[in-house]
C-alpha cells in the first residue's frame, strides 16, 4: 500500500465534518486512494499529490474531480495535522518538513482506526481473500443500508448517513492492531510477508492480538486449523465446509450462472444462495458474508444480493481474446492464491485448456515457483510460462 498523508485542522475524528482541505501525499496508492474517495463522498474537500506516471487507482479519483498534484514540500504548511502512509519513512521530504514545523502526525492506520469509530465497523482480514470478501460484503450491505467501504483494490465509497463501515485490514507489520472494530471477518491464517513475520506462529500471534481488539463478534473460517485456536472476549462464529461449523456450505453446484450452494446454520437448513464466482474459496468468502449479515439480523432475501456481485479490480478479470480464448488477469502472487485462481478457472471453463503466465519475479524465485505450483495444481493446467525479465526468461517452467 502506498503512503497517504492527510492534512486536517480538527483533532476529533469521532463525528462531524473536518471542514478543511485534505491533501493526500501518495494519493494514487490503493489504501489512500480509497480513503480519499471516502472522505470526498462524505463531504470533505480532498486533493493529493503523487508521481506523474499513470496508475489505475487515479481513474476513480479523476472521475470524482479530486485534484492530483506533483509531490512538493510546499504542500506542508502551518496548522495542519499530518497522516502519513507506511511506505514513506521519516526521511521523506514532506514528513521532514512536517516534523520541522512541529505538526501533529499520524500514520494511515492510526487515522483509519479513529475514523471508523463513527460507524458499525467491520474489518475483513486474513492472509488470503481479504479484497474479494471486503468487496462482496460492501456490495451486499450497500444494497440494503447506507454503507461506506474501503477495499484493497483502490475502491472507496463514503456515505454521509452510513450505518456500516466495511474495510480491509492488513496484518502486515501488525498495522491492523490500530483498529478496534465492532466485527472482524477472519478468512485464514498463512505464512506471508516473510520480510516481517518470522513464522506462521508469529502470524497467528498477530491475529490473536487482533481478535482481542474486536468489540462485538468474530466471523472466522472454521476450516482453518489456526483460526480454530483463536481466543476472544466476544463470540466467535465459525463458517466452512466441514461439520461442526456454525455456518456450513453444502451441495455446491457450478453452472453457467455461477455457483449455487445450501447454507446450514448449526445443522439446520437456512437457505440456498447463488454467487456469480467459482471455486471453493469464493463459496467460503460468500459464507463469511452470509454469517456476518445473518448475525446482524439481515434476512436471507436481503443477503441474496450476493448474486449480483461483479467482483473487484485485479481479481479474476476476464477479457475475450482471439479464437474464443479468454485472458484472465489476477493479482494472485502467493502459491495458494494462484491455486485458487486455477480452481476458479477450471470450474468456470471445464472444457478449456489452461495456461499460466506470471511476471511476479519474487514469487518465481521462491522454490522455483513453489515446485511449479505443486506441479500445476495436480496437472489442471498445461504449462507455466514466465513473462518477465526473470533469469528464466520466457521459457516454460513446466
Image: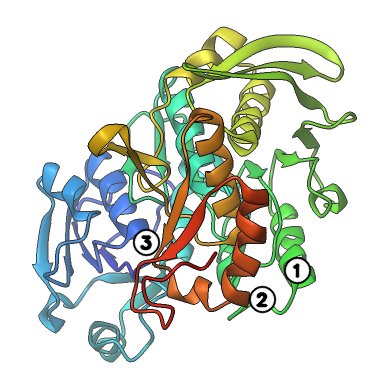
Pointer 2 local density, CA inside 10 Å: few below 14, some 14–19, many at least 20: some
Pointer 1 local density, CA inside 10 Å: few below 14, some 14–19, many at least 20: some
Q: CA distance from mark 3 to mark 1?
A: 38 Å
Can you give x and y, in whole percent of width and height, for residue 65 in the image? 9, 46
Specify the quadrant that holds the N terminus: bottom left
Residue assigned mark 3: 11
Can you give x and y, in whole percent of width and height, for residue 216 in the image? 70, 38
Q: CA distance from mark 2 to mark 1?
A: 8 Å
Residue assigned mark 2: 197
Mark 2 and mark 1 residues within 8 Å of each other at the beta carbon = yes
Q: CA distance from mark 2 to mark 3?
A: 33 Å
Which residue is painted at 63% across and 30% down in the image?
283
Which residue is painted at 23% across and 54% down in the image?
56
Q: Is residue 380 left or right of residue 105?
A: right
Determine the residue located farthest toward the right in the rendered image. 244
Can you give x and y, in whole percent of width and height, for residue 80 in the image? 24, 71
Residue assigned mark 1: 200
Which residue is painted at 15% across and 83% down in the image?
73
Amino acid at each position: 500500500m502506498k503512503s497517504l498523508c492527510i492534512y486536517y485542522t480538527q483533532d476529533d475524528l469521532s463525528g462531524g465534518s473536518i471542514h478543511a482541505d485534505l491533501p493526500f501525499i501518495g494519493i494514487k496508492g490503493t489504501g489512500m486512494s480509497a480513503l480519499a474517495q471516502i472522505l470526498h463522498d462524505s463531504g470533505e474537500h480532498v486533493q493529493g499529490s503523487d508521481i506523474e506516471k499513470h496508475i489505475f487507482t487515479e481513474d476513480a479519483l479523476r472521475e470524482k474531480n479530486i485534484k492530483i498534484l506533483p509531490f512538493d514540500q510546499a504542500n506542508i504548511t502551518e496548522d495542519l495535522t499530518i497522516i502519513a502512509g507506511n511506505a514513506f519513512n521519516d526521511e521523506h521530504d514532506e514528513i521532514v518538513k512536517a516534523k520541522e514545523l512541529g505538526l501533529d502526525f499520524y500514520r494511515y492506520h492510526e487515522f483509519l482506526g479513529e475514523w471508523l469509530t463513527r460507524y458499525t465497523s467491520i474489518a475483513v482480514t486474513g492472509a488470503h481473500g481479504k479484497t474479494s470478501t471486503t468487496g462482496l460484503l460492501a456490495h451486499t450491505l450497500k444494497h440494503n443500508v447506507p454503507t461506506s467501504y474501503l477495499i484493497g483494490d483502490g475502491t472507496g465509497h463514503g456515505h454521509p448517513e452510513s450505518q456500516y463501515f466495511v474495510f480491509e485490514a492488513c496484518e502486515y507489520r501488525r498495522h491492523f492492531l490500530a483498529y478496534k472494530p465492532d466485527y472482524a471477518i477472519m478468512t485464514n491464517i498463512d505464512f506471508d510477508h516473510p520480510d516481517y513475520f518470522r513464522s506462521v506462529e508469529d502470524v497467528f500471534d498477530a491475529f490473536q492480538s487482533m481478535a482481542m481488539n474486536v468489540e462485538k463478534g468474530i466471523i472466522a473460517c472454521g476450516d482453518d486449523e489456526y483460526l480454530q485456536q483463536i481466543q476472544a472476549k466476544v463470540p466467535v462464529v465459525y463458517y466452512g465446509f466441514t461439520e461442526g461449523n456454525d455456518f456450513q456450505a453444502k451441495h455446491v453446484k457450478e453452472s453457467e450462472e455461477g455457483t449455487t450452494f445450501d447454507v446450514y446454520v448449526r445443522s439446520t437448513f437456512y437457505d440456498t444462495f447463488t454467487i456469480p464466482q467459482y471455486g471453493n474459496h469464493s463459496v467460503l468468502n460468500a459464507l463469511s458474508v452470509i454469517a456476518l449479515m445473518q448475525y446482524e439480523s439481515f434476512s436471507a432475501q436481503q443477503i441474496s444480493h450476493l448474486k449480483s456481485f461483479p467482483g473487484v479490480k485485479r481479481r479474476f478479470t476476464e477479457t475475450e481474446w482471439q479464437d474464443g480464448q479468454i485472458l484472465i488477469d489476477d493479482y494472485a502472487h502467493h502459491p495458494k492464491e494462484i491455486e485458487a485462481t486455477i480452481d476458479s478457472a477450471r470450474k468456470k471453463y471445464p472444457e478449456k485448456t489452461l495456461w499460466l503466465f506470471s511476471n511476479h519475479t519474487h514469487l518465481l524465485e521462491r522454490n522455483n515457483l513453489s515446485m511449479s505450483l505443486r506441479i500445476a495444481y495436480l496437472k489442471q493446467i498445461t504449462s507455466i510460462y514466465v513473462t518477465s525479465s526473470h533469469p528464466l526468461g520466457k521459457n516454460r517452467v513446466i
